[in-house]
């Protein structure tokens, strides 16, 4: 393996992790209502499905190329099969993000409803979205490398890294509604991006990254203000208690 192939290899891993984060966030959010054991299982199945779907699609490169060249006319506008996939995926993400955001804003949300059925439904949703994200991911990979073996090894490494990251993120997403809301806002942006891409209007990536930075900055500032208030309140209480003891 020469230097150029090594660079391509690590570039694919890096891109797969970035593209896989959206998928991971979606899996974490929709599996939030499940028990911890079932949740871990759902995340594992979701990421495993993502890996196998990508490998299957990768071995059918001609099919991937054809979905970009075959066009369907809708209201005098040409759409490729890839465009339709992007639009459907975008609409699905927008719908799910808004639905989950509504649930998070409601008080006393009841989660105890047919856990088995929910588990199966969640797995189906994960697989469907895996197909959408995988197509977009493979198209990006084809543009970088034509070597299937290199891509498969890169997919394997990125999937293992995402699986490890998923286990760590469960702790933070489970009991933190603010993190869940942040993830859902990002997924909503991803959905809007996929929808606009399907219609042929590309949203610059800079806007997406600026949105993420703003969201994270707001959260850091909010936590800093809250921490300072707690420190100030504790100091005030300590002073009052010391005065009482002195008297």
Image (cartoon, rainbow, N blue to C red):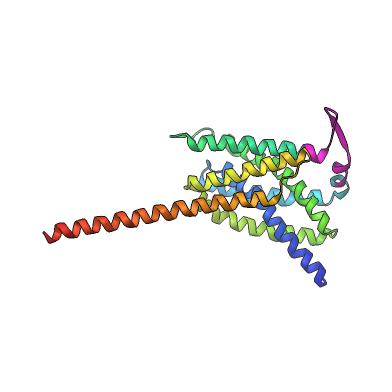
Whether residue 69 is visible, yes or no, is yes
Which percent across, then down, holds residue 220? 49, 54
Q: Is residue 72 left or right of residue 53?
A: right
Q: Nearer the viewer, residue 26 or 74?
A: 74
For this orientation, the residue located farthest to the top is: 75
Q: Is residue 167 left or right of residue 201?
A: left
For this orientation, the residue located farthest to the bottom is: 2
Establish if 49 lies above or below 159.
Answer: above
Q: Residue at x 62, y 55 (%)?
A: 163
Q: Residue at x 54, y 38 (%)?
A: 101
Q: Residue at x 73, y 36 (%)?
A: 88
Which percent across, then down, holds residue 179? 52, 48
Magenta-colored stretch includes residue 80: yes
Magenta-colored stretch includes residue 64: no
Q: What is the number of callouts on the image?
A: 0
Which percent across, then down, holds residue 72? 86, 33
Establish if 177 lies above or below 140.
Answer: above
Quarter occupied by the N terminus:
bottom right
Quarter occupied by the C terminus:
bottom left
Q: Nearer the viewer, residue 212 or 120?
A: 212
Q: Is residue 209 left or right of residue 115?
A: right
Whether residue 42 is visible, yes or no, is no
Which percent across, then down, holds residue 212? 60, 51
Quadrant in the rendering for residue 3: bottom right
Q: Which residues are magenta?
A: 65-84
């Amino acid at each position: 393996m020469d230097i150029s192939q090594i660079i391509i290899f690590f570039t694919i891993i890096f891109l797969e992790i970035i593209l896989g984060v959206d998928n991971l966030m979606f899996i974490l959010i929709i599996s939030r209502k499940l028990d911890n054991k079932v949740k871990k299982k759902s995340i594992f199945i979701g990421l495993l499905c993502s890996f196998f779907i990508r490998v299957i699609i990768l071995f059918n490169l001609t099919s991937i190329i054809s979905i970009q060249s075959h066009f369907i006319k809708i209201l005098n506008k040409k759409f490729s099969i890839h465009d339709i996939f992007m639009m459907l995926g975008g609409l699905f993400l927008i719908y799910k993000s808004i639905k989950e955001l509504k649930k998070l804003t409601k008080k006393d949300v009841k989660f105890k409803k047919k856990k088995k059925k929910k588990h199966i439904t969640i797995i189906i949703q994960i697989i469907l979205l895996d197909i959408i994200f995988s197509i977009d991911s493979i198209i990006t990979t084809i543009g970088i490398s034509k070597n299937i073996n290199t891509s498969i090894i890169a997919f394997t490494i990125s999937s293992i890294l995402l699986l490890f990251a998923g286990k760590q993120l469960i702790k933070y997403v489970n009991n933190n509604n603010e993190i869940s809301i942040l993830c859902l806002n990002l997924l909503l942006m991803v959905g809007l991006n996929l929808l606009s891409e399907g219609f042929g209007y590309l949203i610059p990536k800079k806007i997406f990254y600026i949105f993420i930075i703003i969201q994270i900055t707001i959260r850091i500032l909010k936590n800093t203000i809250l921490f300072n208030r707690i420190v100030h309140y504790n100091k005030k209480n300590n002073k009052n208690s010391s005065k009482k003891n002195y008297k």
